[in-house]
Image (cartoon, rainbow, N blue to C red):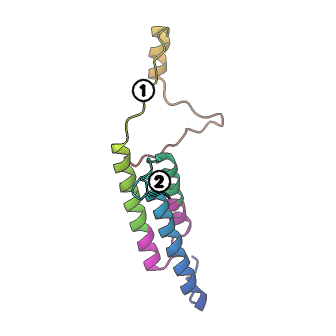
Amino acid sequence: MAEVQNSPQSGEMTRRFIEFVLMQAQQIALLLGHLPGPEGKTLEPNLPVARLFIDQLEMIREKTRGNLATDESELLNKVLADMQLAFVEAGNLAPAPAAPEKPEAAPQGAAAEASASPETPDDDGKKKFTKSYG
């Protein structure tokens, strides 16, 4: 397990890490439409990009597990929980995407086989993984 650094620079690094997490949270809030944009207007939520930022913070949490000070870890966990909740709330308020049109000329036998088959794996034989906050 990695050791926590106790040098004079560790205080500066803690400050920078906290600033980084807060800047990421600010970007997510902006993308979710919770903060005004550059011209003072509230922007339309951009859920895919907000999700990318949230996923990046989750990756930072996993990669730094055991190497953060208590206050850093608590802040990161709180910011992640708050942003995930805000993402779910923004997703519930966003209009539902239009349903794709169903093909009309599909034979009944082929449709029954397609619905009964399990998920199709990728080209490399692995199933795709999707993440949902809601």
Magenta extent: 57-76
Label 1 neighbour load within 10 Å: few <14, some 14-19, many 20+: few
Q: Residue at x 41, y 65 (%)?
A: 79
Label 1 vs label 2, nearer the camera: 2
Viewer-nearest residue: 81 or 42: 42
Name the element at disc 1: loop
Disc 1/disc 2 C-alpha distance (Å): 24 Å
Left or right placement of residue 21 versus residue 88 in this view: right
Q: Which residue is denoted by mark 1 in the rendering?
A: 99
Viewer-nearest residue: 71 or 64: 71
Q: Position of residue 109 (x, y in %)?
A: 47, 10
Q: Position of residue 100 (x, y in %)?
A: 46, 24
Mark 1 or 2, nearer chain start: 2
- The N terminus: image quadrant: bottom right
Q: State whether residue 37 is above or below residue 113.
A: below
Q: Is residue 70 magenta?
A: yes
Q: Is residue 45 magenta?
A: no
Q: State whether residue 117 is above or below residue 112.
A: below
Label 2 neighbour load within 10 Å: few <14, some 14-19, many 20+: many
Q: Amino acid at mark 2?
A: Leu
Q: Which residue is denoted by mark 2 in the rendering?
A: 31
Q: Amino acid at mark 1?
A: Ala
Q: Quadrant of residue 13?
A: bottom right
Q: Position of residue 81 (x, y in %)?
A: 38, 61
Residue furthest bottom in the image:
8
Q: Position of residue 59 (x, y in %)?
A: 54, 60
Viewer-nearest residue: 133 or 67: 133
Q: Residue at x 51, y 74 (%)?
A: 19
Q: State whether residue 116 is above or below residue 41.
A: above
